[in-house]
Image (cartoon, grey):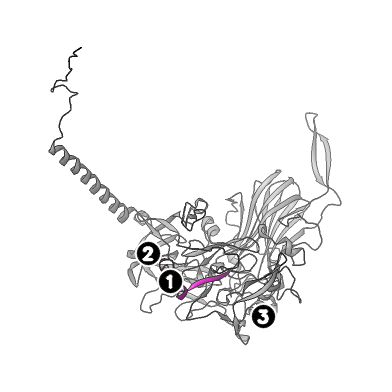
Amino acid sequence: MNRKKSSIPQNSPTAAKPEEPANNVRVIREYVEALATALVLAFFFKAFVAEMFIIPTGSMATTLMGRHKDVHCEQCGFPFQISASEESNDGAEHPQNARNLPSVLAGTCPQCRYTMYVGKNNVDKKIFPSFNGDRIFVNKCQFDFRNPARWHVTVFRYPGKPQVNYIKRLVGVENETVLLRNGDVFVKKNGETEFTIQRKPLRALLSMLRPVDDNDYVLPKLHEIGLPTRWFDHNGHWKRSDDYKSFQITSNITKDVSENSTGNSSENLKPARNSQTKTTWLNYRHIVPSSDDWYYLSQEMLPPNGLTNNPQLVTDFVDYNSGLVYSPDHPIMFDSGLAISTREVQRNGKLRKEFFCRKNLNGMGLNWVGDLAVSCRLHIEHPQGIFSFRLIKGGVVFLCSIDLHSGNATLSIPDVPEFPPAVAATPLRCSGTFDLMFCNCDEELRVIVNGNEIDFQGKGCYDFLCQPDSVLVRDRSPNQLDLTPVGIGSQGTTVRVEHLKVLRDLYYIACDRLLNLQCDLLNPPFLDEYSLTENSVNKIFSHPEYWRHFGKTNSVTFELGKDQFLMLGDNSTRSSDGRLWRRNDLPLYVDRNLLIGEAVFVYWPHGLRIPGTRIALIPNLPKVRFID
């Protein structure tokens, strides 16, 4: 059968048409125009709106990370960072030259102060890679709408080489004189005669607090063989949990049953007569095992003569600066001996060789820090009694007492009647769980509950008592009380506390081109020792007879004119900043026309490694954060 072929008329709208050269040209032109538009918009966005930067060095650590190693302490498990700025990427690109390049071999944990070996030839064959610094998002149009603000992290062009970008925290603004003293920042505006202390906003303060102790990382196995705990109660009222991580205190409670106006019975909880009538304190002491102590503790043995020189004052130690760096030109030597040596120890019934590391003397922290904070999670079973925080600075007690029935918090300085107690309401007037923090920073007492600051309407400030002839002079020295600088108290309460943390404020060292110091004491007792060793430093911070000059520090001033700003790094001991640019012909300020923008967001901290590889491309979401 013959079938008739169907055909589609050529003028039908469904008919296929041959491609026309003109159409191809038009498509290409559209692509080119779109690409050009995108490039122009990207250039405009980068030039005027925002830009992305990578942090190269550790001058802002630990707020922002330069090239570093992320490690977990093999003793207590605390996560910390060690600077790796001294290392070079050439080692990874040219492995044959790696042994001739500097490398980070060890770093000290800020929690237990164990110095941990992180070299490639470690016994357990673990890999401790070095990661590039944080990648950040910078708002470049911020300064078009408002003036640069104090305490904001700012990107600018280095005055000595404008093509190089720096990032620091803006500490001094135009038309004022900035004074650094006792680790704090003071300012005198043009026309004023007196300096006033500058307090940090809450978000900046929380970002700048540095860890001193985190009780979630205790060492039960060492405490069980006799290592003293940092938190202690000699009277035994505070009961410690089996894992050493929480403490509980119970007050005897009686029930008073009465009838209300409707005839219904109600129960009022009252402390019994034999409950606590005085505040029972759980105290903190800053126990810092030395390298000699850890020689034995790392083998689960107590030092034969007990811990050396403990407890100690809190100092400006920063774990980021504790790295021991090997260089072929400069072998690591301390105290006429190797900082890293090998030894034979018993592990799981077997004898093996391992590395033993001593602390880096250049990263120990030589300045006493009295500005402290304490935080915890409080579980309230019965909303009765008084729960208290205590902080000590220079032998003076600062208190925060919270009435768990009314929820009112009272700030006081018991030995200073010139300070009128300040009272404010808090949510702590019912059973439940609360996150609390009490701070004594920048000559102000502050209370934070569940992330929100309690408003005392400025009555927590006590700088008016810190003048030269006042009761709280700024250059007062610490005394024996400062060896137990933090306490948590209970009077008639039934509560449990966990997640106990002690933190310190950032300490700005008063140095400039003439005083390029790591310790800003006017008469440092370290000079009285024959040589600066780890044991001599620990001895000085442990014994009050060395403290008569503590608190009496150098001070430096910086005069700023119109459109001039002072930039300082958060890593005060390792920051080349406005205090001491390397070139003596440079001004110590940054001019407004060199400001680029405000750092806003860490969009890419170093990635997590793909299991089984050295490639770190998995997004590190827990460390993605806003910059404060």
Q: Which mark is residue 96?
A: 1
Q: Amino acid at mark 1?
A: Gln
Callout in the foreground (2, 1): 1
Q: Is residue 190 visible?
A: no
x then y, percent, for residue 500: 67, 57
Task: Give me the residue at 73% from left, 66% from top.
Answer: 349
Say which residue label 2 marks. Answer: 156
In whole angstroms, how far apart are the C-alphas of marks 2 and 1? 38 Å
Relative horizontal placement of residue 600, taking residue 264 as reference (left or right): left
Q: Position of residue 374 (x, y in %)?
A: 64, 59
Q: Quadrant of residue 147?
A: bottom left
Disc 2 element: strand
Q: Pointers 2 and 3 in contact (CB under 8 A)?
A: no
The amino acid type of the residue labelled 2 equals Phe
Mark 2–mark 3 distance (CA, rounded to whole Å): 42 Å
| Whether residue 301 can be seen here | yes
x, y (%) of residue 45?
31, 52
**The magenta segment:** 90-108
Looking at marks 1 and 3 on the same chain, the residue that comes earlier in the sequence is marked by: 1
